[in-house]
Amino acid sequence: MTESIEAGDRAAIEATLPSLDAARDRVAVRMEATRRAALELARSTVGTAHDSQRQVIQITFVVLGIAILIGLLMAARIARRLVGAVQPLVTATRAVQQGAMEGELDVRSEDEIGELTRAFNYMLREPRLKDKIRATFGRYVDPRLVEGLVEHPELTGSAGDKRVLTIPFADMQGFTMLSEQVTPASLVALLNRYLGLMADEVRRHDGVVDKFIGDAVMAFFGPPFIAPHEQGRMACATALAQVSRFEEFRGEVPGILGLKQFMPEIGLRIGIATGEVVVGNIGSASAMSYTVIGDTVNTASRIENANKLYGTRILLNDDTAALVRDSLLLREIDRILPPGKAGPVTIHEVMGPLAETPEAARLPCATYGEGLDAYRAGDRASARNAFERCLEIKPDHGPAREMSERAVRFSISPPPANWAGTHAMASN
C-alpha cells in the first residue's frame, strides 16, 4: 500500500481501499468493545470503591461507638472512684455541721483526694482543740467567759477597759461554823455542790462567774455578754433563783455530810451593785485572770455583808434598783456608809417579782417606809411605832427589828446634830 502511494499507482490504491475499510471497521469495533470494557471496569471499580467506602464508614461508626462505650465505662468507673473517695469527705462535713467533731478520715490515696483528706483532718483538729480547751479550762474559768474571749479576742488584751457592769456577791451564812464540824472530804463535797448550784444559776441567766472566794461566788453581768439594760434584771433573777436553789441544797446537806443532828444553821446572803468597773487581764506575767476590779466590786461585797445586820437575803444599791424597779418589788432598807467608802450607799431589798408578790407582802413594805421616813426626819417615836407595827405583821422582819432597836438607842443617845440619816457600818 505504501509502495503504491509512493509510485502513484491509483488503481492499486483503490484496490486496497476495501481491505483498509474492513480493517478500520474491525479496529473501531475492537476499540468500542475495549471502551465498553473499560467503562464497565470503571463502573465496577467505582461500585467496589463505594462499597468499600460504606464499609469503612460503617467500621468507623462501629469503632467510634465502641470507643464511646469504653470511654463511658471508664468515665463511670473513674466517677465511682471519685465519688467513693469524696463521699466520706461529704459525710464528715455534714457531721461537722451538726456538731460531731470526733474521729478522722483515713487517707487512702496519694493523689489530690488524699491531700484534701489530710487538709480536712488538719482543719478538724483545730475546733477539736478549741473544744478541749473550753472543756478543760471551763472547769477553772467560766465557759461563757472562755466563749466570749474566743468570739471577741480583742478583750484579751492587757489594757483595761472601763464598763458599767452589775456585780453580785453570794456568800453562805454559817459556813465557818460548819467547816469546823466536818471532815475535809465532806467539806469539799459540800462546797462543790453549793458552788456548782450557785454558778449554774449565774450561767443560766447569761452571767459570768468571775471567781470563787472560799464559799463566796463573785460574778458579773453586762456587755459584751449581755445587753446593758438587761444586766440588772438578770442579776436579780439569778439571785432569786440562787435563793430558791439554796433551799433545796439545805435539804441535801445532812446527806452530803452524813449528819443527822447538831446541824448548824446556814443561809444565803447576796449583795448586788451596779457601777463602773475596770475589766481586763490582771495578774503577773506567769499567771493572769480576766476579772473586774473597782469601787463597785467593793460595794457589792459590803452590801452582801450588810445582810447580816438587817437579816435580809438580797440587797441592791441604788443603780441596780433603778434597772429593776419596774419588774421587782423593792423595799428601801437604809442608807449606809460601808467601811472604806467616802459616800453613803442606799440599799434596797428584793422582795420578789412585782407581778407575783401578794398584797399581804406589800403591807410591811409600806409600813416600813413610813418608819424609815420618820427615822430620817428625827421623829424617833413615830419611827419606832411604825417599825413595831411591821414586827406585829411579820415577827421575823429583820430590818424593822434593827431599826426599832436603833430608834430606841437614839432616844437614849441622840446622833449628832448634822446627822443625815446614814448608818456607818463597823469594819469586820
Image: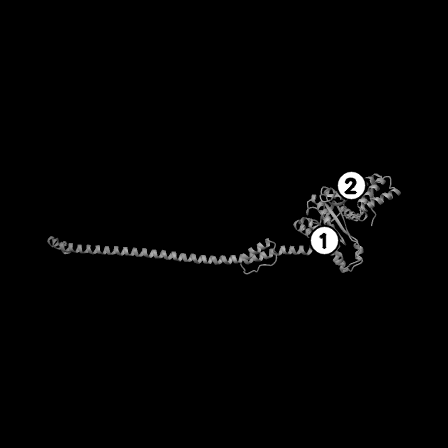
Measured as percent of width and height from the top left, residue 247 is found at 74, 52
Residue corresponding to mark 1: 197
Location of residue 261 by image quarter: bottom right
In this rendering, would 377 be left or right of 357?
right
- Coordinates of residue 15 in the picture (x, y in percent): 11, 54
In the rendered image, the residue lying farthest to the left is 11
Identified by mark 1, the residue type is: Leu
How many marks can you see? 2
Residue 244 seen from this side: yes
Q: Residues within 10 Å of mark 1 (few under 14, many from 20)?
A: some
Left or right of 260? Residue 124 is: left
Residue 123 at x, y percent in the picture: 60, 55
Question: SS at mark 2?
Answer: helix
Left or right: residue 336 versus residue 64 is right
Q: Are marks 1 and 2 in contact (CB under 8 Å)?
A: no
Q: Quadrant of residue 33?
A: bottom left
Residue 197 in percent (x, y) is at 72, 53
Closest to the observer, 341 or 123: 341
Q: CA distance from mark 1 to mark 2?
A: 34 Å
Quadrant location of the N terminus in the rendered image: bottom left
Above/below status of 239 relative to 65:
above
**Which residue is at the front of the view, 301 or 40?**
301
Q: Which residue is mark 2?
A: 366
State the mark number for residue 326: none
Q: Secondary structure at mark 1?
A: helix
Q: Residue at x 39, y 57 (%)?
A: 62
Marks 1 and 2, the one that precedes in the sequence: 1
Residue 112 appears anywhere in the view: no
1 or 2: mark nearer the eye: 2
The quarter of the displayed image where residue 319 is located: top right
